[in-house]
Image: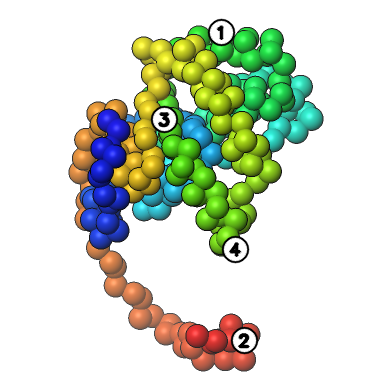
């Protein structure tokens, strides 16, 4: 649910405490996915500067990149443009024991491609008509598909864009396409609504998150993902460090003398 207008932004200490709890659960989920050979896709879409990247980082920073794979595909090559539209996405789908997170996905066709004129109106309409059927096949094949839309307000998006302009550590996040999306707010709103109208299905529903408060949004999203998957804690034998062999002792430090070490500047 949308947070009340008077709700204070979540404090960092409270956020980090709750995030750690959820990250522990993500590790339990990871063990279950590997043990049961599960296949999961999580799609993140939404407004530019809505917080997709920060949310994905919060999800993945404590789990294995061999299990949780993040896909953020660049613009298609000439060869990929000649393929079936979904082809380059399908070849990145999870195998057994994997979770694939799409930082933007095939829904580019319903958003940026449509608004910016990178596809024809006929291609856009065909995508909206065919997408639910394709996703039905995905789900029927046993892949769990979770679709999340992050919705940020106009004022907060503007604040975040201005922060990117002024901060050299964030300037790389601001692309010419971001500036166009800022200018075309209402075109993107109409494209979003068309997308939801056609692709918010029972077998692959959209779940919308208001993300003006980034910290609350991240916690709500992770909690939602965990609630969508009936995972269980997998019993694992506790690891025990073995004794190091004392045979043929080797002087490690002496062996490295004369090698090039990084200068200790700090």
Q: Which numbered disc covers residue 77?
A: none
Give 251 or 256, whichever is nearer the viewer. Answer: 256
Q: Which numbered disc covers residue 148?
A: 3
Looking at the rendered structure, the secondary structure element under dot 4 is: loop
Q: Does 216 sit above or below residue 266?
A: above
- Residue 240: which quarter of the image? bottom left
Q: Position of residue 136 (x, y in %)?
A: 45, 12
At 44% from the left edge and 37% from the top edge, which residue is drawn? Answer: 153
Looking at the rendered structure, the secondary structure element under dot 1 is: helix
At 55% from the left edge and 87% from the top edge, which residue is drawn? Answer: 265
Q: Is residue 174 left or right of residue 42?
A: right
- Measured in 3D between alpha carbons, the distance from the residue under mark 1 to the one under mark 2, in whole angstroms, is 63 Å
Disc number lying in front (1 or 4): 4
- Measured in 3D between alpha carbons, the distance from the residue under mark 3 to the one under mark 2, in whole angstroms, is 51 Å
Kindly identify which residue carries mark 2.
Answer: 259
At 68% from the left edge and 27% from the top edge, which residue is drawn? Answer: 116
Disc number lying in front (2 or 4): 4
Looking at the rendered structure, the secondary structure element under dot 3 is: strand
Q: Is residue 82 left or right of residue 143?
A: right
- Residue 77: which quarter of the image? top right
Q: Is residue 177 left or right of residue 50?
A: right
- Measured in 3D between alpha carbons, the distance from the residue under mark 2 to the one under mark 4, in whole angstroms, is 36 Å
Mark before the other along the chain sequence, 1 or 3: 1
Q: Position of residue 18 (x, y in %)?
A: 23, 51
- Residue 26: which quarter of the image? top left
Kindly identify which residue carries mark 4.
Answer: 168
């Amino acid at each position: 649910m949308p947070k009340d207008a008077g709700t204070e932004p979540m404090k960092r200490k409270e956020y980090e405490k709750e995030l750690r709890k959820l990250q522990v659960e993500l590790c339990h989920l990871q063990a279950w996915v590997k043990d049961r050979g599960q296949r999961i896709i999580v799609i993140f879409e939404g407004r530019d500067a809505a917080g997709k990247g920060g949310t994905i980082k919060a999800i993945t920073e404590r789990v294995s990149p061999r299990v949780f794979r993040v896909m953020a595909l660049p613009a298609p090559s000439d060869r990929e443009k000649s393929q079936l539209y979904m082809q380059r996405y399908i070849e990145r789908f999870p195998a057994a024991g994997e979770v694939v997170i799409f930082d933007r996905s095939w829904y580019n066709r319903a958003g940026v491609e449509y608004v910016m004129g990178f596809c024809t109106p006929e291609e856009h309409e065909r995508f909206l008509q065919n997408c639910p059927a394709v996703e039905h096949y995905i789900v029927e094949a046993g892949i769990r598909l979770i679709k999340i839309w992050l919705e940020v307000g106009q004022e907060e998006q503007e604040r975040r864009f201005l922060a990117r302009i002024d901060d050299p550590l964030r300037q790389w996040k601001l692309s010419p396409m971001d500036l166009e999306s800022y200018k075309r707010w209402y075109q993107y709103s109409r494209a979003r609504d068309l997308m939801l109208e056609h692709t918010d299905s029972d077998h692959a529903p959209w779940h919308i998150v208001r993300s003006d408060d980034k910290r609350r949004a991240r916690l709500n999203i992770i909690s939602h993902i965990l609630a969508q998957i009936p995972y269980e804690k997998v019993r694992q034998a506790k690891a025990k460090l073995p004794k190091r062999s004392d045979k043929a002792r080797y002087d490690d430090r002496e062996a490295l003398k004369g090698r090039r070490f990084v200068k200790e500047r700090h």
